[in-house]
Image: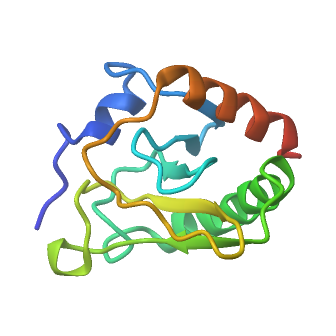
Amino acid sequence: MSYDTENIFAKILRGEIPCHKVYEDDDAIVFMDVMPQAPGHALVVPKAASRNMLDADPTTLAALAALVQKVARGAIAAFDADGLTILQFNEPAGGQTVFHLHIHVIPRQDGTPLRPHSGQMEDPEVLKANAEKLRAAIHI
């Protein structure tokens, strides 16, 4: 399958759709998931056009992994998390619904299950506050 330049993350990268941005550099952007499975659920998205990790350039993957680690450390601190769930899906059978490579960083609390990743969007003010908390905790 080929890369669709009209996917929602490509539109966010082009500035056509707003997001609650946490971090951005020449290679990637980090923003809050609008349907979070836990408070502080963030997405780490490379700017390079790749459908998923199966067609991504290895250098993109390496840089992405380093950024995910920094975001994960920040998420633990910002949300006083007991742990993390890191998710990355490939193709529909693997659970992928947005066909631009991205990694979910989800802070977790002991004994608290993940909420469903449904059509229920979080209050924008909550997302804004969580983006600010995470931004302050990331040391990049």
Quarter that holds the C terminus: top right
Coloration of the structure image: rainbow
Residue 65, image x and y in percent? 64, 68
In the rendered structure, the answer to whether residue 35 lies left or right of residue 27 reads left
- Residue 136 against residue 37 in the figure, above or below: above
- Residue 8 against residue 65 in the figure, above or below: above
Residue located 56% across and 55% down the image: 38
Residue located 61% across and 37% down the image: 26
Residue 12, image x and y in percent? 38, 30
In the rendered structure, the answer to whether residue 17 lies left or right of residue 45 reads left
Residue 22, image x and y in percent? 66, 34
Badge count: 0
Q: Nearer the viewer, residue 80 or 69?
A: 80
Kindly indicate the quadrant of the structure image that contains residue 108: bottom right
Quarter that holds the N terminus: bottom left
Q: Nearer the viewer, residue 21 or 66?
A: 21
Residue located 44% across and 68% down the image: 57
Residue located 47% across and 44% down the image: 33
Kindly indicate the quadrant of the structure image that contains residue 84: bottom right
Kindly indicate the quadrant of the structure image that contains residue 5: top left
> In the displayed image of the protein, which residue is found farthest to the front?
111
